[in-house]
Amino acid sequence: MTLAAEGAAGFAPALIGWQRHSGRHDLPWQGTRDPYRVWLSEIMLQQTQVSTVLGYYERFLQRFPDVHSLADAPTDDVMTLWSGLGYYSRARNLHRCAQTVVLEHGGAFPANAQTLETLPGIGASTAAAIAAFCHGERISIVDGNVRRVLSRLLAFDGDLSQAAPQRALWSRAQDLLPADPTPTDMVAYTQGLMDLGASICSRTRPGCERCPVRSMCLAHLAGTVERYPVKTRKLLRRHESWWLQIWRNVSPEGQKVWLERRPARGIWAGLYCAPVFESEALAVESPQLAGLNVHDLPPIMHSLTHRELRLHPLLVDVPSDRAMVTHTEGQWVLLDRLDQVGLPTPLRTLLQQLPD
């Protein structure tokens, strides 16, 4: 069973008409053709809910209103502002991309998807979104939500955990594009794909009765919507335990904690964190804890994309005259100034709730 030519030809007009009438129109990054703002929103929206992104997007624009201000900013400022949004490699690539645009492209984002894709942190689907929204380029996005929409529409049974079927679906996506679109058509079409995947064609319990293209959706017609998309490879999640030494010092200015910068690669790369140990023995037998009171705090579970972290905090009250010997870059930070440092979300929450 394949999508007939008339069905394929009718998909784009139906989607465009529905988006203009029933799609989302009140998001702060809509209604602009500024590549900087579209790019920023697209990076933030990767694997993150719109409701979460809204506040971060506005704060970023207030602090970095254009690509030049972002490129010139210290890395710590970027990471601090991103803190809590997760997937921190996005923030590092965001900064690198801004610097590349300024240094190699004169501060102007390239006008086509092919060149956009050469920039740090911009993949094929993000490049297509920027090119379609800002320049009306006739090219389709195929992010995770759109793969789900199209695999159901086409009853595409290729295994999307593998590269070759992903490329095949990408090719099919280009065949569904509007025939001779205006720039505003491409905006509505691209946004329509996003809206359909976000609001109707959900992973579970899709709202097929509200779908504007249900009459041409092969999976819906066959009653097999839940079968798609096909993915056979399961996400393997590792379980790790970390012990965190929370060094606290009470000074005339207030309570301080010692924070060290995480390595440039790995979990929470580039953020600040309490000293991390991979075993309880290493944490509690650390020579610099000699003579100090150590208190176990309740463990914290934190989920990452490929890992489950079990964090074991150890609260260590350090006298003002006690010298701490460390092997990494670090600093004492007042608890009431944690918002000035890039911190992982679970650590920030923990430090804000430390017992007296």
Image: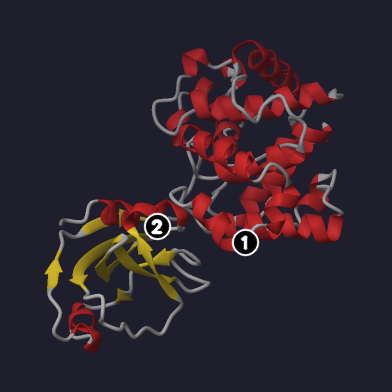
Q: Dot 1 corresponds to which residue?
A: 74
Q: Secondary structure at mark 1?
A: loop
Display coloring? secondary structure
Viewer-closest of 69 and 191: 69
At horizontal 70% and vertical 18% (from top left) the residue drawn is: 16
> Which amino acid, mark 2?
Pro
Q: Is the residue marked by circle 2 packed among few (<14), some (14-19), or many (20+) residues within 10 Å?
A: many
Q: Dot 2 corresponds to which residue?
A: 344
- In the rendered structure, the answer to whether residue 192 lies left or right of residue 297 reads right
Viewer-closest of 348 and 123: 348
| Label whose residue precedes the other's in the sequence (1 or 2) | 1
- The quarter of the picture where residue 239 lies is bottom left
The disc at residue 117 is: none
Query: Which of the two discs, 1 and 2, sits closer to the camera?
Result: 1
At horizontal 47% and vertical 69% (from top left) the residue drawn is: 266
At horizontal 64% and vertical 54% (from top left) the residue drawn is: 94
At horizontal 21% and vertical 56% (from top left) the residue drawn is: 354
User: Where does the C terminus fall, quadrant-wise?
Assistant: bottom left
Which residue is situated farthest in the top direction here? 21
> Which amino acid, mark 1?
Pro
Disc 1 from disc 2: Cα separation: 18 Å
Residue 210 showing in the rendered view? yes
- The quarter of the picture where residue 343 lies is bottom left
Which residue is situated farthest in the bottom direction here? 287
